[in-house]
Amino acid sequence: MQASEDMKFHSISAPLDKKASTTDGTLVVQFTVKHEKKDYAFCGGGYIKLLPGKVDAKAFGGDTPYSIMFGPDLCGYDVSRIHLIFEHNGENLLKTDEIKLDYADKDEFTHLYTLVLEKDGSYEVFLDQDSKAQGNIVDGWDFPDKEIKDPEVSKPEDWVDTKKIPDPEAVKPDGYDDIPAEIPDPEAEQPEDWDAEEDGEWEPPMIDNPDYKGEWKAPMIDNPDYKGPWEHPLIPNEAYAPETYAKYKDLTTVGFELWTVNGGSIFDNILVTDDKKYADKMADKTWKKIKGEEGSGEKEAKEAWKKENEPEEEPEDEDDEDDEDDDDEEEHDEL
């Protein structure tokens, strides 16, 4: 499946052979992406969506509700990440810290993206079977926390959290303000050729005064009324329900809904399963064959194709160069 046109929205969906879920066990989502026209200015998404319930394929688009969105998101130098978004109570939650892609991960070759989500909320994201991120979804997304700040309580108006104060007994020394910021350079000498009648009265250049201490400020002392930082009391969060976080019983459809600046992106080897070992086995049969034993099979195939199909650059004719040199000499003689 290829997004063949530049500067266009692409959308397509298809039903799963059987429903998937995150409530009964492991969910594995795996697919390959090849940004065939990848260059430094490439911009485009490459993520897959898992959708619940009945989906109208003809109406499928950006406004169609989804449960999980997963895959690469690239745009120039600034955006280079793997998206992993979960729907919760009608809100799509992005990962709080991005799953970064390295510079070497952004090329025109085929890459394998794998998401493993366990029933207990633990997850792991793989790129080309190398782990890129792992943890538990309660820590990486803005699902409701176990406790929240008590909305009925606010910091007392007389609470003192200023640790240091100016010493109220300190007094500015007499003559402090009489010390200038600059003084004439005591080591400067009038030039021997200085003419007072023509140049005026000589004045030494000004330099910073080493005795000047700036604007006077009272020294700081411990505040006797300091109570420490105020901590907002916490209360149980009624919305806290970890048993519902990223729990989807009725995943029926996969879809791609993308905006691509550069066409040519190819999506293949799409797999939704509950078995990571099976996903690895299928990767061996598909992506690894494309990649090759040493990891350079696709690159070597591209170079071989270019060698066979693209004309070689013809070397410059030495006689032509000699003729050009002769012409230059003739033109020089005429001048």
Image (tube, rainbow, N blue to C red):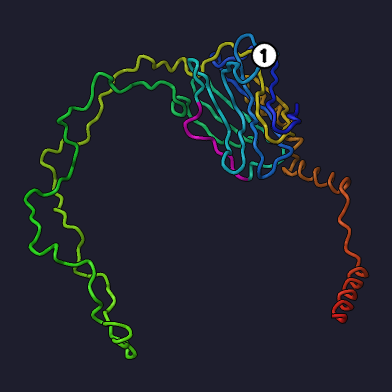
> 10 Å neighbourhood of mark 1: few (<14), some, or many (≥20)?
few
Q: Is residue 207 above or below residue 53?
A: below
Task: Give the image quarter of residue 57.
Answer: top right
Q: Is residue 175 above or below residue 159?
A: below
Q: Is residue 112 above or below residue 154?
A: below
Q: Of helix, strand and loop, which mostly describes the magenta segment?
A: loop
Q: Secondary structure at mark 1?
A: loop
Residue at (89%, 58%) from the top-left corner?
A: 314
| Left/right of residue 307 with respect to residue 164 in the rendered view | right
Residue 233: image location, x then y, percent: 25, 24
**Type of amino acid at the residue the image marks with label 1:** Ala
* Quarter of the image that includes the C terminus: bottom right
Residue at (69%, 18%) from the top-left corner?
A: 13
For the view shown, which residue lies furthest in the bottom direction? 192
For the view shown, which residue lies furthest in the top direction? 54
| Left/right of residue 129 with respect to residue 92 in the rendered view | right
Asked whether 327 falls inside the magenta stretch, the response is: no
Residue 14: image location, x then y, percent: 70, 16
Residue 8: image location, x then y, percent: 70, 29
Say which residue label 1 marks.
59
Nearest the eye: 288 or 258: 258
Residue at (44%, 22%) from the top-left corner?
A: 143
User: What span is in magenta?
Assistant: 94-103
Residue 317: image location, x then y, percent: 91, 66
| Left/right of residue 222 with respect to residue 147 in the rendered view | left
Task: Give the image quarter of residue 32.
Answer: top right
* Quarter of the image that includes the N terminus: top right
Task: Give the image quarter of residue 254.
Answer: top right
Residue at (65%, 41%) from the top-left corner?
A: 106
